[in-house]
Amino acid sequence: MHSRPPIVCLLGPTGTGKTAAAIAIAGRLPASVINFDSRQVYRDFPIITAQPDADERAACPHHLYGFLPTEEKMTAAKFVELAVDRIEEVRGEGRLPILVGGTGLYLRSLLSGIAPIPEIPGDVRRKVLERVAKEGPQALHAELSRTDPDYAAKIHPNDTQRNARAAEVWLATGRTMTWWHTESEHAPAPYAALKVGMRIALSELEPHLAGRIDVMLERGALDEARAAFARCPDPDAPGWTGIGCAELLGFLRGELTLAEAREKWVRNTRAYAKRQITWFNKEEDIHWFAPGENGPIADLAEGWLRERG
RNA sequence: GCUCGGGUAGCUCAGUCGGUAGAGCAGGGGACUGAAAAUCCCCGUGUCGGCAGUUCAAUUCUGUCCCCGAGCA
């Protein structure tokens, strides 16, 4: 009987020093960092999305950072596919995979598995999106109440994204969301995961988030946004929806002063951190640490790995 | 100094033909299965600028004072 391959997962809200903790672990044993953050995958926004810098990347191999062009969409399913490949690759090199990031859905999809819903054809998707725009999500929700009452009961009539998603899945596959979630064959990933979480009160995190944004601006966040806009002038492109990107774009187009853009950026980042905290509070089996407790985190990871042989 | 607007929730503002008031944003809590840094749900008492008058009752009408903006001097 083989034991399941060990991986370490470092999670927590934005700006809590997850990267530094990962590097601390990599200082003790051969390890590679794999990103599970939905925004740090974008090539055009290394500063604004707080991707590890050159020094940090030099400490150990890093994967799934800054490889996607702004006009391309990242999804949970695509992420799982990429992450599984990377984990295999890293394990093949005899290294410990350390998953680092803040997108709760991505981590859960990787560890708990995700329904194998096929990719939805572009024309179906477009048709559904046009309908929501015209008739509102409530119309789709009313239909969903007939085709899939269980799922309809779980999502709110005003939820544009989830109602559109349920409609396109039904149209394209002839199966309901409920069927895909409960009847389709998908299993949890075969990893033994050590989950390490960064815990901090939002009120304590807030001043740090504001300071971090000022550092980003000093390091050229504005030039980064300007260059990205030259490369991809569509403000609705997937990469532009990141926090900080949209605000800086507002400044570059003269819709906001720089001070207003900064203030909005801070507020949105704070609200986002709050949502992350809510999500991770529900996640189970997490070993919680305060930001900066990198020694104890590395101790834990080392001990845990030794126990498993 | 005069005229006209304004002064209502942390911010921007709506409203009350007189019966003590409500939206958006912010904030707090929560949800979350291919857009997730997304999307969505729940949570609203604040001397309605101060003082006085009329009235059973004033944030609403009247007077006066203070503050802000625009115009005229």
Image: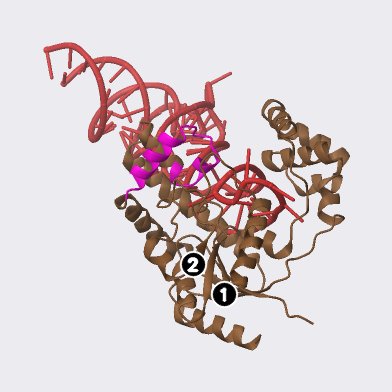
A9, above or below A233, in the image: below
Residue kind at label 1, given as amino acid type: Arg
Residue where numbered disc 2 is placed: A61
A190, above or below A305, in the image: above
Residue kind at label 2, given as amino acid type: Pro
Q: Is residue A234 magenta?
A: yes
Q: Secondary structure at mark 2?
A: loop
Location of residue B21 by image quarter: top right
Residue at image location 61% in from the left, 66% down from the top: A89
Q: Is residue A4 visible to us here?
A: yes
Q: Secondary structure at mark 1?
A: loop
Q: Report which colour depicts chain A.
A: brown
Percent across and percent down for residue A285 are 66, 74
Please state which of residues A248 and B71 is positioned toward the viewer in this rendering: A248
Q: Report which colour depicts chain B.
A: red
Percent across and percent down for residue A250 are 41, 35
Please state which of residues A10 and A142 is positioned toward the viewer in this rendering: A10
Specify the subunit that label 1 lies on: A
Quadrant of the frame with the C terminus of chain A? bottom right
Residue where numbered disc 1 is placed: A95
Please state which of residues A167 and B43 is positioned toward the viewer in this rendering: A167
